[in-house]
Image: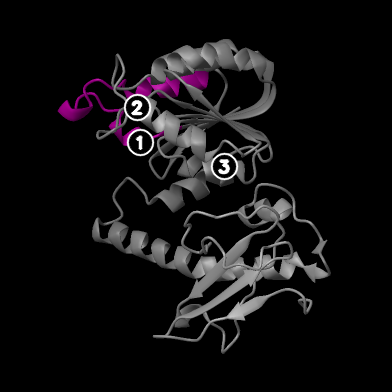
Amino acid sequence: MLKPRERINQSRILNGSSKSTVVCPGAPDADPHRRVNPLRGQERQLCENSLVLTVDMTPSMQCGSHIVLLYCCWKDRNLLFGRKPLHPTIRGVRMGSFLRQLQELVSFRSHGLRLSEISAWERRNFAPPSPPHVKRSTLRRNGNPFSVWVETGTFQGDTTEFLARTAEFVHSIEPEPTLFKLVEKRFQTTRNVKIHFGLSENVLPELLPKLAGDVNFWLDGHYSGGITHRGPTETPILQELEAIEQHRERFSQVTVMIDDIRCFHPSIPEFASYPALDIVVNWARRNDFDWHIEHDIFIARG
């Protein structure tokens, strides 16, 4: 239970929405500079010794009249965002129960997004590409657990963040300058993520000699339109596979996953610059990899 000296202000229920604000010990008596809604990912305003958090819940997120109160000292602010291990208690309040309730609330929104993606996929008669959350689940299921990931094509970093939740370390390569600055800032406080700037065919030969043990490769560095980088070739996959093959003996278990394998049909005009699927299959066989295709992803393990 929160201590009396902690100032708690529960606002009124208005228009079907409930808000609760918790000011942690050490916060000044003046009004907070800014309130934060962790469910919507808005920016966080930190006081010198405290953190002010606001939870905004729709009726579907409420459980009766219960309002989740988040209690977190400034030094432990990263607990809420998964950036360091859970501290068992803070001033007698068990953080585990609060975080579990927060995760339940966030799951409402995540579940709705996934249903929307599945509905859109169904309208396409489940044709590739699969929804992002399906592909990410495929990566986690087929990758070596608690190992190093090497990703080509960071884009906005959503997959990078997903992999970092369970990976020992994630190396992600992004050649587009604007995207690189964006994701570098996004992960500047994430200890197990390193964003590399440059073309994957140039970065991999320098990076791979520094790695050992179990390694997963997520190769998604091809041009995808929009702001994504267009290099000397539409896709650097052959150079990427060559670099992996040259350093194969350094690694124990290796999983190589190539996205958008449907594009590897150069007989189709729009994919004329892609290598044939047979070339990728022969590479896997030459390196004694078992392979299969799942959700538009070529998966080779050895």
Picture coordinates of residue 256, whole percent (x, y): 52, 29
What amino acid is found at the position of numbered circle 3 in the picture? Leu
Picture coordinates of residue 16, whole percent (x, y): 42, 85
Residue on which disc 1 sits: 260
Can residue 7 be seen in this snapshot? yes
The span from disc 2 to disc 1 (Cα, nearest Å) is: 9 Å
Q: Is residue 282 magenta?
A: yes
Name the secondary structure under disc 1.
loop
Task: Name the quarter where the N terminus is drawn.
Answer: bottom right
Residue on which disc 2 sits: 222
What amino acid is found at the position of numbered circle 1 in the picture? Asp
Residue sitting at 45 percent across and 81 percent down? 17
| Residue density around tag 1, few if under 14, some if 14–19, many if 20 or more, within 10 Å | some
Image: magenta residue range: 258-285
Can residue 153 be seen in this snapshot? no
Residue at the outermost left position: 269
Is 250 left or right of 260, judged from the image as shown?
Answer: right
Residue sitting at 50 percent across and 15 percent down? 203
What mark, if any, has residue 163 been given in the picture? 3
